[in-house]
Image (tube, rainbow, N blue to C red):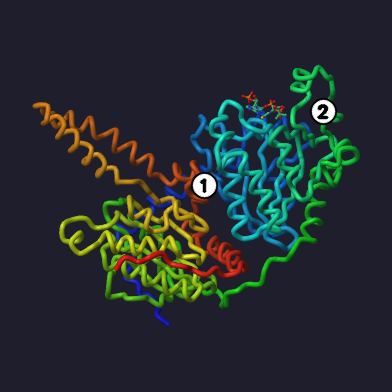
Amino acid sequence: MAVMPTGLNSGTEDFQLNKSFYEGLVADLHQRRARAHAGGPEKARQRHRDRGQLLPRDRIKLLLDPGSPFLELGQLAGEGLYDGASPSGSMITGIGMVSGRPCMLIVNDATVKGGSYFPITCKNHVRAQTIARNHRLPCITMVQSGGAFLPEQAGIFPDEGQFGSIFCNQVEMSSEGIVQIAIVMGSSTAGGAYIPALCDEAVIVRNKGFMYLGGPQLVHAATNEVIGHEELGGGDMHSRTSGVTDHLADSDEHALFIVRDIVKHTPAPGAQRWSVTAPLAPRYPVEEIYGIVSRDSKYPTDNREVVARLIDDSDLEEFKPLYGDTLICGMARIHGFRVGILANQGVMFSESAKKGAHFIDMCCKRDIPLLFIPDVPGFMVGGAVERGGIAKDGAKFMTAMISAKVPKYTLITGASYGAGYLAMCGRPYKPTAMLAWPSAHAAIMGPDQVANTLAQVRADVLKRDGKEWSAEEEEEFKAPLRKSFKDFSSAYNFAANLWYDAVIEPTETRQVMALLLDLAGRMPAVKTQFGVFRH
Ligand code: COA
């Protein structure tokens, strides 16, 4: 038992300023979520309702068990891309309970450009499939899609990770026994028709769902055949004649009911492999995090105070607290699930990197999942640390982090730059889930550093040509660089591009982690084989 002490004084002006700044960030997050929730333009939503169809979020509500959580993934995907034409990346994906089983829901939003797939829609679908595959979650896809958004074909058609990978994943998951179910709820053309056709079981809604490789207009143009939607790809035809669909439903509601029944007959989730204790609230209020996280990334956050408000009973069994203290490492529980925490408390040094590698090794040996909490300007630079072999020690940390086969989670809470972002289990190292708080910033360099670096390079070039620049010219050069790096680093840019799975409030963190850990603990453990460590 090692309860983390707190030195927090919530009465200071600094605390209050941080708090009101963070409350502004949270209000902004909720506005963004509300915009994403709305889906397509009101006109398109009204047309959808006029056709007698349920909106995608209402379909989800009806499918889920009463009271089920729904962990939405990629909710802010597409924000600001394609002139804002693809809220949530034109689809809703997330994990919820259906007939007592956790399932991955993948739901086209036909109110957004007819549910057609933008590049980010493909990425969203593929990412949801990856998370489903990693946890053996049945996939339930509600299909109503005009296939590829044709003007964006380069980002949809030719490459791995795009539309074709959706089919590949469906087939591979099905072969691994991960159940694939589809409901054809509206017009589903081309790629939109292959998705249900590649499922284990497909339901179609009478008079509403249509699926065909080419719609009536295309058929007429190509073959001169005149044929209506119903005859070409309606529910009756596919359920009685072609055999493409397996269940004919009378309405959206009926289709969802049928799917709930199908799920009842799928394999139950695996048993929990970890010993989970009764959850205990942290000793200090989680809401205090708002006053703790620094409102200005130039002034560091005391992440010990943050960790103390995320873990059960604020109980951290800290590893090597007196060594490499810019990386906090320790065993704790979140909602009763054991985790190995690695949280930054300043710049990474050789000692912090070596300690982190040692800690990851132990967690892997003990089958303890890792939670990385990056808030790091990067690794220390300079002659002394280079002579001390920081490249070797950073590599050791990276080798441990990349090799680790226990579930890995990344929660970016502050500014996370360069090799620091990467080493703390950045997206390229495939964390099981990549989460961020609204205060997160990530980039290859901070805005000031990039402006200063490139200004120095420019000054050297000018000098070589025998020229100089004035302080005003230098500032004119630097200002747009600072702005573009600041905009890039925003949590919402990362979420829009699906480099993060979700932006969550600090107060949501424990519940989100509990859900993810519960799913991960139902998978068999995978043995870690480390790469060669450079000593
Ligand atoms: N590519 C690009 N834009 C598409 C699209 C696609 N595949 N499918 C629909 N859209 C656009 C429409 O141009 C329209 O854009 P707008 O809002 O700027 O006017 C918007 O999506 C809504 O389409 P609309 O036809 O009004 O909606 P709907 O609900 O009545 O019908 C479809 C939806 C999908 C049945 C119909 O749009 C359709 O048949 N699309 C073509 C499907 C196709 O042939 N796909 C082949 C892809 S390989």
Q: Amino acid at mark 1?
A: His
- Say if residue 4 shows up in the picture: yes
Between 499 and 201, the one lying in front of the other is: 201
Residue 46 placement (x, y as % from top left): 70, 31
- Reading the image, the residue beneath label 2 is 229
Percent x, y for residue 102?
67, 60
Can I make out residue 111 in this image? no
- Eye-nearest disc, 2 or 1: 2
Helix, strand or loop for disc 2 = helix
Residue 74 is situated, as x and y percent measured from the top left of the image, at: 55, 47
Which residue is depicted at the point 47% across and 75% down? 365
Q: CA distance from mark 2 to mark 1?
A: 40 Å
* Of the pair 221 and 83, the residue shown nearer to us: 221
Callout 2 crowding tier (Cα within 10 Å): few <14, some 14–19, many ≥20: some
Q: Say which amino acid is labelled 2.
A: His
User: Can you tell which quarter of the image residue 198 is in?
Assistant: top right
Q: Quadrant of ligand 1?
A: top right
Query: In the displayed structure, does residue 382 sit left or right of residue 404?
Result: left
Task: Determine the residue positioned at 43% across, 47% down.
Answer: 491
Quarter of the picture holding the N terminus: bottom left
In the image, 123 versus 176, the foreground residue is 176
Query: Which numbered marker is on residue 255?
Result: none
Would residue 464 be found to the left or right of residue 400 on screen?
Answer: left
Q: Please tell me which residue is depicted at 66% across the width and 58% down the height of the picture.
A: 137
Name, please, the residue furthest toward the bottom.
1
Q: Give the quadrant of the C terminus.
A: bottom left
Specify the quadrant of the image occupied by residue 472: top left
Q: Quadrant of residue 176?
A: bottom right
Q: Which residue is mark 1?
A: 30
Q: Which residue is painted at 64% across and 31% down in the image? A: 42
Q: Secondary structure at mark 1?
A: helix
